Every structure is written in C-alpha cells, then in structure tokens.
Amino acid sequence: MTRAPSAAQRRVIDGADPVTGRVRGTEAQLAALVKRGLVFRHPRPPHEHFLTPAGHRIRAAADETPAAEPAGQPAAGAGVFAARVGGADETAGPERAREVHSAWQGLLELRRMTNADGAVDRPCGWERAHLVRAAALALEAAGHRPAGAAADGYRVRATPQPEAVAVYAPDAEALAACAATLERAGWQPGEYTEPRTGTRYLLASPRRV
C-alpha cells in the first residue's frame, strides 16, 4: 500500500490552487512530492510545480469535490472556488464576477503550462478530469448565468458517456449561445433531443486537437 503523505506534504497539497493545481513549498517538500508522483515540475521556466492527477485525487478527497455532492451544490470548504453548475439558489455580484474571471485566467494559464504545445485554445488534463466544473466555468466566465442565480439559466450535468457533459438552457436561443461559448472555449458541442421528454440539450466534449 502506498504510504500516505506526511502532514507537511498534505499542507502543500491542500494549499494548491483549486483551479490550476499550482503548489508552493520548500525545495525538499516539492522534491519529495515529485518523487511520489503527486506533483510534477513544469519543464518550461519558471519551472512551477503542479499537482498530478494523483495529487488532485488526494486533494479532492479532502475537499469533497462537487462530483461527490448533490448536483448544483458548491464544493465543501470555505474559501474554495466552485464553478456553478446550475440548480442552486445563489446570488451573483461584483465579487463573484472577479472570482470567476480569476479562475478562468488561472485555467488558461494551466492550459498553457500543461498542454504539450502550450495551447490555450483547447482543454487540458485537469478539465478532462473535472468535466462538469470545467464546462460550467467556461460558461460562467463568458457571462452566462447558471440556473438558480438566474430565473432561467444553464445547467451542466454529468453523463454516462466518457468525456461528455450535458448542458441545458431554457430555450433554443440560449442553448445556441451556450454552444457557441463552449466551442470558443475549446469544446465540441452537439445538440440532441431527449427521446422521452423532447427536451433539447447539448452534449459537449473537450476538444483534443
């Protein structure tokens, strides 16, 4: 069995940026986490350190990420940014707008740092591991309002299909606007109809190339 991280290493992991996964610590702490496969050192200057998927899983287990919570609920843990997937009665204001803008800029930086070619026009590994949160952030950052914060807003939901989320909107115009936003953000959206209800929705996947 793999030995659990030490208390000092857990503090480094738990202190990682919730969007980019960038970590700070002493050289010894970071080297030990790299050796254990929980952190990687980016090859390009300034050679920042980021959580690996294994490191993200350890951090997510402590924070109880939205994937493990009821749909529409924010992530547990005060002060942790959570993309709004729609369905919760949440207010929006200048402070939230600043948080969303900062999170989106951090995600673009994560794309630049972790995509092999430094591309920022397509999703990165973190987004593929957090599909619902990533799609919701792309929508909210572009100015769309989630259901709950707006009377008729978007909703992003997980699907049984690999690397795909479902996006719902109140009408055809709003759905088309969500599709355009996701496409600009590097996703591949397609419009479908639920057979039993006739509800139109988007099925969106992160673009690979």
Image: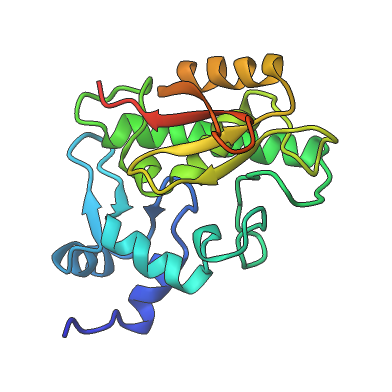
- Residue drawn 58% across the image and 40% down it: 156
Q: Quadrant of the N terminus?
A: bottom left
Q: Nearer the viewer, residue 29 or 123?
A: 123
- Residue drawn 39% across the image and 31% down it: 205
Q: Quadrant of residue 199?
A: top right
Count of residue discs: 0
Position of 141 with respect to 182 (left or right) is: right
Residue 189 at x, y = what percent? 45, 23
Where 145 sits versus 188, above or below?
A: below
Residue 196 at x, y = what percent? 59, 38
Q: Quadrant of residue 112?
A: top left
Residue 137 at x, y = what percent? 57, 37
Q: Quadrant of the C terminus?
A: top left
Q: Nearer the viewer, residue 125 or 33?
A: 125
Q: Nearer the viewer, residue 167 or 135?
A: 167
Residue 113 at x, y = what percent? 30, 34
Q: Does residue 185 appear anywhere in the picture?
A: no
- Residue drawn 65% across the image and 45% down it: 84
Where 73 sits versus 141, above or below?
A: below
Position of 149 with respect to 197 (left or right) is: right
What color scheme is it?
Answer: rainbow
Seen from this angle, which residue lies furthest front?
196
- Residue drawn 35% across the image and 42% down it: 128
Q: Does residue 36 appear anywhere in the picture?
A: yes
Position of 116 with respect to 179 (left or right) is: left
